Amino acid sequence: MSDVIKLIVPGKPEYVGTVRLTVSSVANKVGFDIEAIEDIKVAVSEACSNIICHGGASSEKNNDYYVICTISEDSLEIVVEDEGAGFHLENYTAPDMEALNEGGMGIFIIRALMDEVVVNSVINQGTCIRMKKYKKSEA
């Protein structure tokens, strides 16, 4: 059986730290080591920042976004979703490492830090970033 924690977060940058602290606490409870917790915090920050910059915060429907943590014995799944503008996933390309820009690294960073990442987006309905991190087995 899994425990689920749901947050409704105002689409404002000042609340990203609150989400980071909450998710960090949850990851600690699950038993992740400090390195994994830091990876999770960065990935969640990137997902929240993407939502604020490109999603729900710019939507007239709803300024809030949602963070859902599902805790299981061996993993932590975090979903960050909004009801905003959405985007065409087929237009997403990984950043060019030879010519980095200031923006455009969020999804790339999330995929690098988490074990599983699924991004779904529908124009005028919102974006959902589903991230999962597995605990390392104690060998």
Image (cartoon, helix red, strand yellow):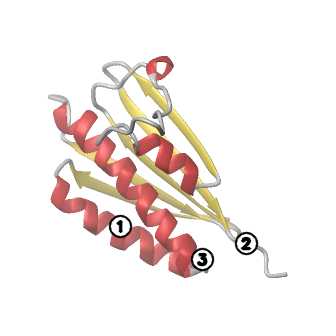
**Mark 3, residue position:** 32
**Residue found 56% across the figure and 51% down from its top:** 112
Left or right of 109, for residue 73 = right
Q: How far apart are marks 2 and 3 (CA)?
A: 8 Å
Image coordinates for residue 81, horizontal then vertical, percent? 39, 42
Percent from the top left, x then y, of residue 43? 45, 56
Residue type of the residue flagged with mark 2: Lys
Tag 2 residue: 136
Q: Is mark 2 on a helix, strand or loop?
A: loop
Q: Is residue 39 left or right of residue 58?
A: right
Does residue 55 appear anywhere in the picture?
A: no
Residue 32 appears in the rendering: yes
Question: With respect to residue 48, does 14 lie above or below?
Answer: below
Nearest to N terminus: mark 2 or mark 3: 3
**What residue is shown at x 39% (from left), y 48% (from top)?**
47
Mark earlier in primary sequence (3, 1): 1
Question: How far apart are the alpha carbons under marks 3 and 1?
Answer: 15 Å
**Secondary structure under the numbered disc 1 in the rendered image:** helix
Query: Which three-letter amino acid code belongs to the residue tagged 3?
Result: Phe
Location of residue 87 by image quarter: top left
Pointer 1 residue: 20
Q: How crowded is mark 1: few (under 14 residues within 10 Å), some or many (20 or more)?
A: many
Q: Which residue is drawn at 34% across and 58% down?
A: 7
Quote the CA–CA distance across marks 2 and 1: 21 Å
Q: Where does residue 94 sit, x and y in percent of width and height?
A: 50, 32
